[in-house]
Image: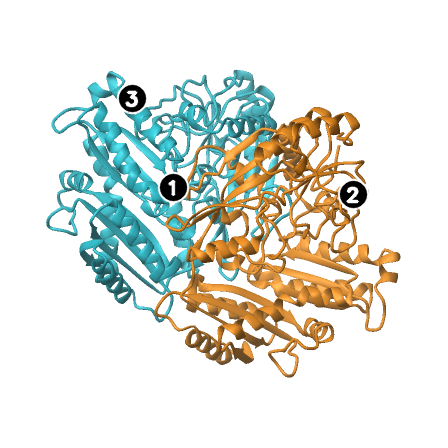
Chain colours: A cyan, B orange
């Protein structure tokens, strides 16, 4: 079992790294947004290079020190907090922020693990390309953490998640060796897919210090519409219709329900709602077209076809890029509105796409059996990925429900439904420390055994992010 | 070290499996297309289910028997032949051929490991969807082998390789346990990416018995053009132009050179060439558009723009689907023409896209230093993936060059150039038995060490496809 940074180990670290690599352990490194996980201390280093981190990891390996990789701190499952660990070594990527290279002809960008997503977006844009990974925390989330958690977001439908956007990684392994895997090739079958394994391993198999990321052409024409749909089932049929008409040019397809829109109104009264009367179910459809196509025309055509099939009853098509952005701001403000109200529990689940309407119904029924709670279910319905959040009844506080364990009952009830429908209890946020038990309960035992064997093989002393994803030995 | 099927083990296998699972070991199971690898015997089983295979693997694990997974037998790197192994257990997937389910709404199809690619295409098409994995051997290649080698082909540019087309796998592991990983979710972050690890592991970590595969909308409009380009550099610029104008709707982008076209004429005199006079460099551009776009118009526009930029000097746009197919038949016949002439050696390499013209030049120079050989370099230039094949000078036979080791010198010279350009010595065919030494020479040692650790972790007795990808212990 991994242990603390001892006085002796600290002396070795201070001798091996430049003084500038040591930073004050500000409280933010020990806390996370949901307030569920807390660190109690540790030694913070912010290496400048993979080589510096390698030197530190060799010392950590020799002394069997717990190592917590820290990116932008935006994770929602506690993966970045050494909860319950005695004085871990916290490795912040904040000083490895360079964009090492942009190759627009080859559609590749090389970013260091500490590069902030918004900066990667800007660098791609400056080269006339798109890096499509897109999520609410893009102003602070860092590439190392985004890849570590295989981040999803709003463009997965079209472009894939972080893993699919990564061609290669440079990473420091548990023994301090540096994996030089920054191949920027679309096709490379020279051995096992370590890139895919490290992406999504949440810092438990290695620390990603740089990545070769895929870029895309910037769509010539973009457009968006907010459409009122009859039901989640109608939303799915609308997605089918959109893809039939526009192929893979549908970039985003987000579902919202009235409860969420009410929360938005309450939390952000100045935010302009697309519809006067808040609709029970609505979707944000985002498209990006090639040259010579007209986005407004394409969306009007879709709208008319959807009305003809009685899927859609009302809609607004963005008249400008500013209005498209306003639609997205509205959608992206949802987590903020949820935090304003204060969820008893939040789920990040996915189910096979065609079962999504059934899941919403069954999930609501499962919650209703426990109590008259409010539900805000929203998200990336195009990927079968919903955030299914449960709130106390109007006027009540969530605290009592958390204190008496109702939160855990709600989570179990919802996850049981997900499992029964062959879904995932972690669609895009990862396992972290929050869902270790859920993983043990719901994941295929053969997969779990293989995961444990791989963890032991690549990190035999269990020093990398102990307690995340898998229970520490 | 893994050993033979002993009399005792065979008796156990015959007791555990139905008689129909045992098949005659016809010569085809011991040979492969290039004649480089030969098996000498073995016990052949063709299980009907993952459960039958699981029972067999448990016995193989107990007796430490070498196991050779066998799909369609179309692999080009010897991964399917137990060369040098004493009486291995050969596991053919040929009786697990079912399409278990098609979910057009969710764009997913579940196929067993023995399903033939062309049958998967047909099943997808019948449901109004596209399964885009496309390669010459689609009439005999099986899903288990295609995934095992992370097959590429002609549509990777747009749709990705086999790994990116796979949402989940069912696989029998070395100890006989069955990984139930047929999740058909676009987003699933519940643990390490075993799917990605098994795909491309060439049967050395597990045997894929079924897979959840991604389907796509069938493009409303398809089109193709054969364009004469000034140079490989002009071909790349043309690709950039095509993607600027058509975004991700460029499905295929294949480069050919005059030597190859001559081989085609020689081998298949009745095959109609698109150009009277064989051009030095030409590309096949294939596009698939959404509703409301016109493919011929899009290709004419591209042609005119490319002529204006002096990239292209001549071209033919397919006037019909039949002509588009004829273009592809012409391109797909290239391996046949190469076999007709008989290459001294063939390479399956990739380099960073923008270095591709440099690679062609440097590769030619490296070959010229060894002798006045003919080169046919062609392939999926949109992916940076070229097949770079070397032939004896006109009128000479390749045999002498193979007998005196010139083939190995050529391979080393070309692979050295690839390595220097940060490319891959195996872009899409895999490592198999052919490139084990190359992998040891060129692959990052940290990656190799991690691969060996993973192999030991998941297959501690080394029974799965011993000697493929990694040297057997």
From mark 3 to mark 2, how far is it between C-alphas?
A: 57 Å
Asked whether residue B386 appears in the rendered view, the answer is: yes
- Whether discs 3 and 2 lie on one chain: the answer is no
Q: Are marks 3 and 1 in contact (CB under 8 Å)?
A: no
Q: Nearer the viewer, residue B118 or B424?
A: B118
In the image, is A313 to the left or to the right of A57? left
* Residue positioned 22% across, 57% down in the render: A323
- Residue matched to label 3: A409
* Residue positioned 64% across, 37% down in the render: B446
From mark 1 to mark 2, how far is it between C-alphas?
A: 42 Å
Name the quarter where the N terminus of chain A is drawn. Answer: top right
Q: Are marks 3 and 2 in contact (CB under 8 Å)?
A: no
Reading the chain from its start, which is encountered first: label 3 or label 1? 1
- Chain under disc 1: A
- Of circles 3 and 1, which is in front? 1
Residue A415: x and y in percent read 34, 29
Q: Is residue B22 above or below residue B418?
A: above
Q: Nearer the viewer, residue B126 or B383?
A: B126
* Residue positioned 42% across, 77% down in the render: B297
- Residue matched to label 2: B83
In the image, is A138 to the left or to the right of B143? left
Residue A352 circle label = 1
Residue neighbourhood size for the residue with mark 3, other residues' Cα within 10 Å, grouped as few (<14), some (14–19), many (≥20): some
């Amino acid at each position: 079992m991994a242990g603390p940074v001892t006085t002796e180990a600290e002396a070795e670290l201070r001798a091996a790294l430049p003084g500038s690599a040591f930073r004050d352990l500000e409280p933010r490194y020990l806390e996370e947004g949901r307030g569920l996980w807390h660190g109690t201390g540790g030694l913070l280093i912010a290496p400048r290079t993979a080589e510096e981190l390698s030197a530190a990891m060799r010392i950590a390996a020799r002394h069997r020190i717990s190592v917590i990789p820290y990116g932008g701190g935006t994770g929602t499952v506690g993966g970045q907090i050494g909860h319950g660990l005695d004085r871990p070594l916290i490795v912040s990527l904040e000083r490895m922020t360079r964009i090492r290279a942009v190759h627009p002809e080859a559609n590749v960008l090389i970013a260091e693990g500490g590069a902030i997503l918004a900066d990667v977006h800007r660098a791609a844009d400056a080269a006339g390309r798109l890096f499509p990974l897109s999520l609410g925390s893009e102003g602070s989330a860092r590439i190392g953490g985004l890849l570590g958690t295989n981040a999803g977001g709003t463009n997965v439908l079209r472009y894939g998640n972080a893993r699919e956007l990564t061609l290669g990684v440079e990473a420091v392994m548990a023994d301090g060796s540096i994996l030089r895997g920054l191949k920027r090739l679309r096709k490379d079958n020279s051995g096992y897919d370590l890139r895919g394994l490290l992406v999504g391993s949440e810092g438990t198999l290695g620390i990603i210090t740089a990545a070769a990321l895929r870029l895309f052409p910037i769509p010539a024409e973009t457009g968006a519409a907010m459409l009122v749909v009859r039901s989640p089932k109608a939303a799915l049929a609308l997605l089918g219709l959109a893809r039939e008409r526009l192929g893979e040019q549908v970039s985003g397809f987000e579902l919202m329900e009235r409860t969420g829109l009410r929360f938005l109104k309450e939390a952000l009264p100045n935010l302009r709602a697309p519809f006067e009367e808040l609709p029970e179910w609505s979707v944000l459809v985002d498209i990006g077209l090639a040259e010579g196509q007209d986005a407004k025309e394409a969306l009007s055509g879709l709208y008319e076809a959807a009305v003809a099939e009685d899927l859609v009853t009302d809609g607004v098509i963005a008249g400008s890029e500013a209005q498209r952005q306003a639609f997205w701001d509205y959608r992206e403000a949802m987590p903020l509105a949820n935090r304003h109200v204060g969820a008893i529990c939040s789920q990040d689940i996915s189910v096979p796409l065609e079962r999504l309407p059934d899941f919403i119904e069954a999930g609501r029924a499962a919650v209703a059996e426990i109590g008259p709670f409010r539900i805000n279910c929203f998200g990336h319905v195009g990927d079968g990925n919903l955030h299914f959040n449960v709130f106390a009844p109007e006027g009540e506080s969530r605290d009592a429900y958390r204190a008496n364990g109702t939160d855990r009952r709600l989570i179990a009830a919802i996850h049981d439904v997900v499992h029964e429908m062959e879904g995932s209890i972690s669609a895009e946020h990862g396992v972290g420390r929050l869902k270790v038990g859920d993983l043990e309960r719901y994941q295929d035992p053969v997969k779990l055994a293989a995961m444990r064997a791989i963890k032991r093989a690549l990190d035999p002393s269990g020093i990398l992010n102990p307690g995340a994803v898998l229970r520490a030995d």
